[in-house]
Image: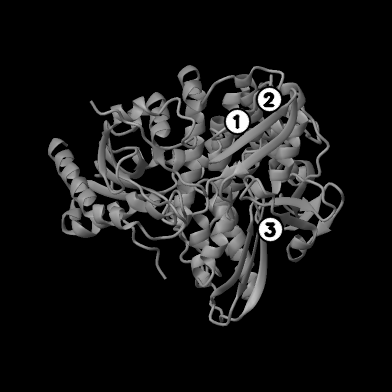
């Protein structure tokens, strides 16, 4: 085969991207993964804005993981402004994050990646043959969105999060009303793990450096230290010292690498490999029942990691929702002062870092957002190189599909790109 | 401080939902949201009608199905690219939408068309019997909150069309 393989738009990833594999004398000569516009463009958009507008603006970077952008940004801004949130605010933010994990993982597992593993072009064709599977996914996703709406005020882009807490507490009735659905979601998640274990995963293992947030006392999603399978442990303040970004000529998105110039991998696989012991017992039990062996070094098995996290987050959500009984103010009053702050949280797709400089009027003077997809970008390309020698021998269409499968297993989120409905209508 | 009142509450009596879809920080991608906001502002006195609800959905993806659930009819307003002049208003039936939804690898995976196709094949009984899409042809899609002048000028026409379709749906309800 002496033709280039060009995939002009990656289907079934969140957002738009393209991939070109150039062959020379039948061998792979160049691999170009192009993510058109990363959240980097939002950084300029934030300059000069009032700090309290940031959580609502960054939420709009992604329709699937708005909470992650809010959580990293409010933490960074609270650090900059030296605001300490109450334990109750922290618990409600964790519950909000659970909502996002439920809707995002349900989407990725069932709609974006599973069709590849069971041999369907899309969830639409999967639904035709296995409607119950897709219905389960839709109900799980809806429960996540309903919880998002109850806490955040809207089911897609929550607007209730602010620096210092929440604009208002959701009513106890609204949260408690969701408990039975969350309990259903927990059962459905256990079923999801069992079902995920029956899927056939391509054989592909690499020796990755995994990086994730970690805490001793809980499975880290909302905050924590940054740990690596190399043993490195850094604080959010030190992130940019050890995890660097560089421009590459072929893409608008930056490439991340470690200070030692190696690639690294963030996301569910990283979290589960590094923090398995902190998972809630019911999630560890679900993993045990399918005979899960760690470490997982097969990127396609990120789906299994997501399914286990779904059990964890639904179980946590049930507890947090049942115990929800806020007292006192939902929002902490504070004085605006100049400062610099750092925030990291675990978006469903991996570690998400924000840094802001705020001036004496509370206006944003500097913003940096390093999303998980950008951090995984170099690792995705490295994987494509590892996969390519065998795949390029396949017919072109099959080769394209194989490359897309690998990329989709990472769940890249490129949703800051536009979301147009591309219409071609022939008028009679 | 209060939550912005964007009218996203839902009454039990709601039979018609008008949903603006888009990305408000992406130039003309926000046209659908802007048109629904303008309709809401222009025809506010009529919105006492409990049967009519409004939603603003930025990048909803599959969550769009949740927003549609339980209504008898729905009007979706979204920016489109069909090759027309920017600002052109298109009225598209669900049947028309469906025939262009499959096989497209250029649109990102989960646009309105794919989402509705999936919804019809799984939870159709929970979705409105009638869904109409109003498409507003986009011009520029640069990062920023402003619409292009052609699209801005078309908003009133879009708002009128929304109101006309709402009235028709109310008559049929």
Among the two numbered marks 2 and 3 on one chain, the one whose residue lies closer to the N terminus: 2
Outermost residue, left side: B171
Where residue B144 appears, as percent x and y from the top left, is 44, 60
- The total of numbered circles placed on residues is 3
Are callouts 2 and 1 both on one chain?
A: yes
Q: Quadrant of the C terminus of chain A?
A: top left
Q: In this rendering, would B4 be left or right of A165?
A: left
Mark 1 secondary-structure assignment: strand
Return the residue at label 1. A6
Residue wearing tag 3: A223
Residue A350 visible at all = no
Q: Secondary structure at mark 2?
A: helix
Q: Residue furthest front?
A: A25
Q: Is tag 1's residue or tag 3's residue first in the polypeptide sequence?
A: 1
Residue B82's disc number: none
Q: CA distance from mark 2 to mark 1?
A: 32 Å
Residue under the point 26% across and 45% down: B88
Residue A345: name its quadrant.
Answer: bottom right
Whole-angstrom CA distance, mark 1 to mark 3, is 39 Å
* Res. A197 mark: 2
């Amino acid at each position: 085969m002496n033709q280039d393989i060009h995939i002009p738009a990656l289907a079934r990833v969140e957002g738009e991207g393209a991939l070109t594999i150039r062959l020379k004398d039948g061998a792979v000569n160049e691999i170009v993964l192009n993510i058109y516009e990363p959240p980097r463009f939002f950084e300029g958009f934030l300059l000069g804005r009032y700090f309290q507008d940031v959580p609502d603006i960054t939420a709009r970077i992604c329709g699937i993981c708005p909470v992650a952008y809010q959580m990293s940004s409010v933490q960074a801004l609270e650090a900059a402004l030296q605001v300490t949130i109450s334990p109750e605010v922290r618990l409600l933010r964790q519950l909000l994050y659970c909502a996002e994990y439920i809707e995002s993982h349900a989407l990725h597992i069932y709609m974006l990646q599973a069709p590849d593993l069971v041999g369907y072009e899309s969830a639409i064709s999967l639904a035709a043959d296995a409607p119950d599977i897709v219905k389960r996914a839709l109900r799980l996703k809806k429960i996540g969105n309903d919880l998002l709406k109850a806490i955040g005020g809207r089911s897609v882009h929550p607007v209730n999060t602010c620096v210092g807490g929440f604009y208002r507490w959701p009513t106890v009735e609204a949260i408690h009303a969701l408990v039975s659905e969350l309990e259903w979601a927990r059962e459905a998640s256990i079923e999801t793990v069992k079902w995920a274990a029956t899927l056939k995963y391509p054989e592909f293992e690499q020796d990755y450096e995994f990086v994730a947030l970690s805490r001793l006392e809980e499975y880290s999603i909302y905050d924590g230290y940054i740990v690596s399978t190399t043993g490195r442990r850094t604080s959010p303040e030190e992130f940019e010292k050890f995890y660097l970004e560089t421009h590459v000529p072929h893409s608008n998105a930056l490439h991340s690498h470690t200070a030692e110039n190696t690639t690294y991998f963030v996301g569910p696989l990283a979290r589960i490999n590094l923090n398995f012991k902190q998972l809630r017992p019911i999630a560890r039990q679900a993993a045990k029942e399918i005979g899960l062996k760690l470490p997982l070094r097969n990127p396609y098995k990120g789906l299994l990691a997501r399914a286990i996290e779904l059990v964890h987050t639904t179980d946590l959500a049930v507890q947090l929702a049942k115990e929800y009984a806020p007292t006192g103010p939902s929002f902490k009053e504070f004085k605006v002062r100049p400062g610099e702050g750092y925030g990291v949280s675990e978006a469903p797709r991996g570690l998400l870092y924000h840094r802001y400089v705020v001036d004496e009027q509370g206006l944003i003077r500097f913003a940096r957002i390093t999303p998980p997809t950008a951090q995984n970008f170099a690792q995705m390309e490295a994987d494509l190189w590892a996969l390519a020698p065998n795949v390029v021998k396949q017919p072109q269409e099959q080769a394209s599909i194989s490359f897309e499968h690998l990329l989709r297993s990472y769940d890249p989120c490129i949703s800051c790109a536009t979301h147009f409905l591309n219409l071609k209508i022939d008028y009679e | 401080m209060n939550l912005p009142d964007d009218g996203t509450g839902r009454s039990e009596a709601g039979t018609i939902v008008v949903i603006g879809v888009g990305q408000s920080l992406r130039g003309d991608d926000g046209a659908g949201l802007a048109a629904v906001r303008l309709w809401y502002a222009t025809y506010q006195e009529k919105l006492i009608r409990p049967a009519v609800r409004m939603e603003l959905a930025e990048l909803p993806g599959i969550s769009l199905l949740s927003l549609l659930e339980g209504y008898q009819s729905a009007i979706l307003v979204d920016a489109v690219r069909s090759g027309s002049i920017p600002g052109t208003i298109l009225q598209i039936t669900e049947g028309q939408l469906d025939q262009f939804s499959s096989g497209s690898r250029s649109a990102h995976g989960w646009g309105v068309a794919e989402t509705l196709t999936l919804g019809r094949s799984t939870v159709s009984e929970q979705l409105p019997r009638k869904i109409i899409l109003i498409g507003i042809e986009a011009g520029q899609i640069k990062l920023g909150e402003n619409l292009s002048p052609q699209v801005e000028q078309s908003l009133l026409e879009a708002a009128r069309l929304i109101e006309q379709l709402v009235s028709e749906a109310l008559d049929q309800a």
